[in-house]
């Protein structure tokens, strides 16, 4: 893993951008490797003793401090309930979907996005087999869940799941559990869940960072423009890769409210910088920059801060806001 | 309020600066992001990542006496992202509706976008139709004349473009810049969408103060 510090390609196969800040990254990694070693030992003890990964304060705390890369697939399957889903539907579910009848239109749509998924990742260039594997997973899922079918953005999520778990079937189940259990209707044909959650975020920002809320409103930048990709891609292609995976650790365990914690932390921690952007273009640019700076690269500190910076964020109030704002949208619809 | 000392000014002579919001619409994979990338950065990637939600960029073009700054909103093409589209084209003064000359369905979808813009966007919106991937002429299925006739009927600017070879990319943005009204109040729908004319000698004003 340490070798990736000096490599132009990271451990997941992503080419580092030209302007990659190696110095800051090395500083961070020299500390983070110590954390990783400690966490690896702790997890080894937890899993090695055959203790249950069932929901408990200990497991939750462990997850928040980061799941070691080699255990991610298995732990995500357990804490999200994906493995129970697989028990219920049968272990040959994925294989049956693969060999079942296919809708050519779905295959064509998915195929169009394959070369456009992580083109800068060495495993996703045409020479490797990841494009074909991703195609199988996305097509199988589109046939499994006809209400969702294929939604652009799922390619990035499934692609990253595949890079991490290195297993097609695990990727399929994790994708399924995200779309059907963890997230509220983000990828359906009308994407209602995303539209509602963008409105929920706006309300939360209004309550928690009111000056930024007013500023963004005055400048006239819609929250949808800033955050649609944050919600749809669950920060893949938005935040640095290690940070994304640490967010996903918590997402699989704690559910979709983690997304709001990340969003509000980003906004709150960069409040002054955002307030200084006086026009539309610089503000939009600033919202991009704050997803790449050294604050978010320091994934361990960042993940600690998402549980402190936003303050209290009970699931019940998010669910209340979702109901209220979804209804509000319905009321507005017939124009 | 908003523009506290914000928008850029050119180093050159007096001339006015107008800022316009331009949105790109069209079916998935017709080349919307590639057109923007070519126009803004002069680059082309064979495999351009699919746009999720919307991307935002700016680019400036200079006309004789006016500098036109485009706020470019590039959107996701997949049908289901349609429900987000009004948030992006609200208040836009210009739109480029893109289709792929090698794919008939994308031309049909472009017509649907044009209809929607004519019905729902700002009444004075300048719409350009771009038949992209013109470098793939041997795979052409949408005839130039057919598209041009359609554009004429509907009062659209029309060009065939190639983000790959750069053919007509600057030209289509320039044609839009020329056609946009630079001196009168533009009735944009939202405060973010209104034209901001900023004259060198003038104090910066809030976005509500338009070309006038």
Image (cartoon, grey):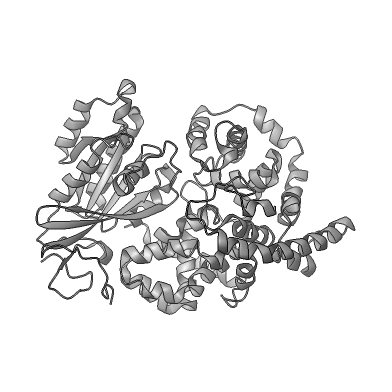
* Residue A205, x across and y down, in percent: 47, 73
Taking depth in this image into account, of B26 and A162 the one nearest to the observer is A162
> What's the residue at 32%, 20% (across, down)?
B138
Q: Is residue B94 left or right of residue A38?
A: left
Extreme-top residue of the structure: B138
Q: Is residue A174 left or right of residue A277?
A: right
Position above or below: A69 against B103:
below
> What's the residue at 59%, 56% (across, down)?
A183
> What's the residue at 41%, 63% (across, down)?
A223
Q: Is residue B111 left or right of residue A274?
A: left
Taking depth in this image into account, of B201 and A132 the one nearest to the observer is B201
* Residue B47, x across and y down, in percent: 45, 37
* Residue B198, x across and y down, in percent: 17, 67
Asked if one can make out residue A176 in the rendered structure from this viewpoint, the answer is no
Give the number of marks: 0
> Quadrant of the rendered structure where residue A62 is?
bottom right
> Quadrant of the rendered structure where residue A254 is?
bottom right
* Residue A255, x across and y down, in percent: 64, 61
Which quadrant does the C terminus of chain A fall into?
A: bottom left
Extreme-right residue of the structure: A49
Taking depth in this image into account, of A241 and A56 the one nearest to the observer is A241
Asked if one can make out residue B66 in the rendered structure from this viewpoint, the answer is yes
Position above or below: A8 against A79:
above
> Quadrant of the rendered structure where residue B127 is?
top left
Position above or below: A275 against A21:
below
């Amino acid at each position: 893993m340490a070798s990736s510090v000096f490599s132009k390609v990271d451990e997941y196969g992503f080419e580092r951008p030209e302007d990659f800040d190696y110095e800051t990254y090395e500083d961070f990694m020299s500390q983070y490797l110590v954390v990783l070693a400690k966490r690896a030992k702790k997890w080894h003890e937890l899993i090695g003793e055959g203790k249950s990964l069932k929901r408990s304060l200990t497991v939750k705390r462990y997850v928040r401090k980061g799941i070691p890369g080699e255990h991610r697939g298995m732990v995500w399957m357990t804490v999200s309930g994906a493995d129970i889903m697989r028990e219920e539907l049968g272990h040959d579910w994925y294989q049956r979907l693969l060999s079942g009848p296919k809708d050519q239109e779905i295959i064509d749509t998915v195929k169009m996005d394959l070369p456009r998924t992580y083109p800068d990742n060495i495993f996703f260039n045409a020479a490797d087999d990841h494009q074909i594997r991703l195609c199988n997973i996305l097509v199988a899922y589109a046939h499994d869940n006809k209400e969702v079918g294929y939604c652009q953005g799922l390619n990035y999520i499934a692609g990253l799941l595949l890079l991490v778990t290195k297993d097609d079937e695990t990727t399929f189940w994790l994708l399924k559990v995200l779309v059907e259990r963890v997230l509220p209707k983000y990828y359906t044909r009308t994407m209602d869940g995303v539209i509602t959650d963008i409105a929920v975020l706006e309300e939360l920002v209004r309550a928690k960072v009111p000056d930024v809320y007013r500023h963004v409103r005055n400048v006239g930048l819609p929250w949808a423009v800033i955050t649609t990709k944050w919600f749809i891609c669950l920060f893949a292609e938005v935040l640095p890769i290690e940070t994304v995976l640490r967010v996903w650790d918590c997402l699989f365990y704690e559910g979709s409210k983690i997304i709001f914690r990340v969003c509000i932390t980003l906004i709150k921690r960069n409040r002054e910088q955002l307030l200084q952007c006086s026009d539309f273009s610089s503000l939009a640019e600033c919202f991009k920059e704050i997803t790449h700076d050294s604050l978010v690269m320091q994934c361990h500190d960042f993940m600690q801060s998402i549980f402190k910076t936003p303050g209290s964020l009970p699931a019940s109030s998010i669910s209340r806001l979702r109901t209220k704002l979804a209804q509000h949208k319905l009321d507005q619809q017939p124009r | 309020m908003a523009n506290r000392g914000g928008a850029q000014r050119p180093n050159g002579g007096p001339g006015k600066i107008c800022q316009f919001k331009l949105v790109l619409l069209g079916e998935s994979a017709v080349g919307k992001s590639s057109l923007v990338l070519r126009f803004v950065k002069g680059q082309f990637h064979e495999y351009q990542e699919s746009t999720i939600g919307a991307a935002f960029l700016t680019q400036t073009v200079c006309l004789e006496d006016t500098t036109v700054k485009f706020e470019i909103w590039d959107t996701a093409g997949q049908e289901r992202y349609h429900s987000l589209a009004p948030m992006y084209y609200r208040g836009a003064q210009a739109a480029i509706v893109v289709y792929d000359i090698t794919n008939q369905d994308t031309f049909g979808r472009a017509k649907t976008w044009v209809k929607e813009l004519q019905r729902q966007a700002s009444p004075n919106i300048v719409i350009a139709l771009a038949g992209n991937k013109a470098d793939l002429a041997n795979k052409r299925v949408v005839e130039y004349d057919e598209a041009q006739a359609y554009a004429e009927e509907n009062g659209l600017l029309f060009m065939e473009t190639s983000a790959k070879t750069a053919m007509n990319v600057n030209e289509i943005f320039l044609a839009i810049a020329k056609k946009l009204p630079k001196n009168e109040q533009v009735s944009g729908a939202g405060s973010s969408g209104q034209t901001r004319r900023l004259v060198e000698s003038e104090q910066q004003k809030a976005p509500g103060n338009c070309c006038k």
